[in-house]
Image (cartoon, helix red, strand yellow):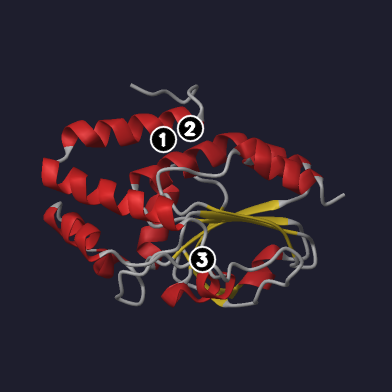
Amino acid sequence: MTTSQDSMTQQLTATLEGSLTQLPAEVSAAFAADRDGLDAAGTPAGVAAVGSTVADVELITAQGATTRLHSEISGRPAVLVFYRGAWCPYCNVALGAYQRELVPALADRGATLIAISPQKPDGSLSAQESNELTFTVLSDPGNALAGHLGIIAPNNPDAIAAQKQLGLDVTEHNADGTADLPFPTVVVLDADGTIAFIDVHPNYTTRTETADILAAVDALG
């Protein structure tokens, strides 16, 4: 059993180990093959480069209102956390850890934290409420921002079929009705919206450590 005192990595590992014992063998095998493939492929080509400017795309708040990325940043340094959806247990572990460890530290640094996924606004609201998040959670319909950053993961038909076997149909959760998902990614932006740090995790069971995020924010000067 994990507690809030466990590190995020410990909690992620425990979540993965728990799934191996709780899920049907054929489902576990499909997910394992998917992760192995993602690990083998590594970080995709075409990921946005440090020094490039992030696009000011249209996003949707958890309450269903339209907004834009630059409006949400409001001229402050920002940490963008891309996650798959409220249905993803690994994402919930990471979001909870960032709430505990990043929110106060970023407030001290005058930076903002924003979580972004392709799911419908009600999914954003679910992620916000279930994890007791005090930071902004937005929907990126059609992965417009994720696509701009080059972090859209490939679809694996076997993994999608395994998800459906568990009663999960990602197309019902995503705002555009597709199964497209971003790689779990953290992007640190300076006050001008320029990318200072980008860390892409092809394997969705791992996440960017809080210490690395704060080091990137501190390096902004």
Number of marks = 3
Q: Residue at x 42, y 47 (%)?
A: 91
Question: Which residue is the extreme one toward the front?
Answer: 40
Q: In whole angstroms, how far apart are the C-alphas of marks 1 and 2?
A: 5 Å
Which residue lies most toward the right here? 221
Identify the residue position indicated by label 2 in the image.
9
Q: In the image, residue 82 lies at what x, y percent?
A: 51, 58
Q: Quadrant of the N terminus?
A: top left
Q: Which residue is mark 1?
A: 12
Image coords of residue 27 (percent x, y): 16, 48
Viewer-side residue, 59 vs 81: 81
* Camera-nearest residue between 41 and 194: 41
- How far apart in space, not on screen, are marks 3 and 1 (Cα)? 21 Å
Q: What element does badge 3 sit on?
A: loop
Quick check: can you spot residue 28? yes
- Who's the residue at 80% across and 44% down the image? 218
Residue type at tag 2: Thr
Residue 57: x and y in percent read 59, 77
Vertical order, 150 against 86 (above or below): below
Other-residue count near label 1 (Cα within 10 Å), few / some / many at <14 / 14–19 / ≥20:
many
Residue hosting label 3 = 151
Q: Earlier in the sequence, mark 2 or mark 3?
A: 2
Residue 210 shown left or right of residue 34 in the figure: right
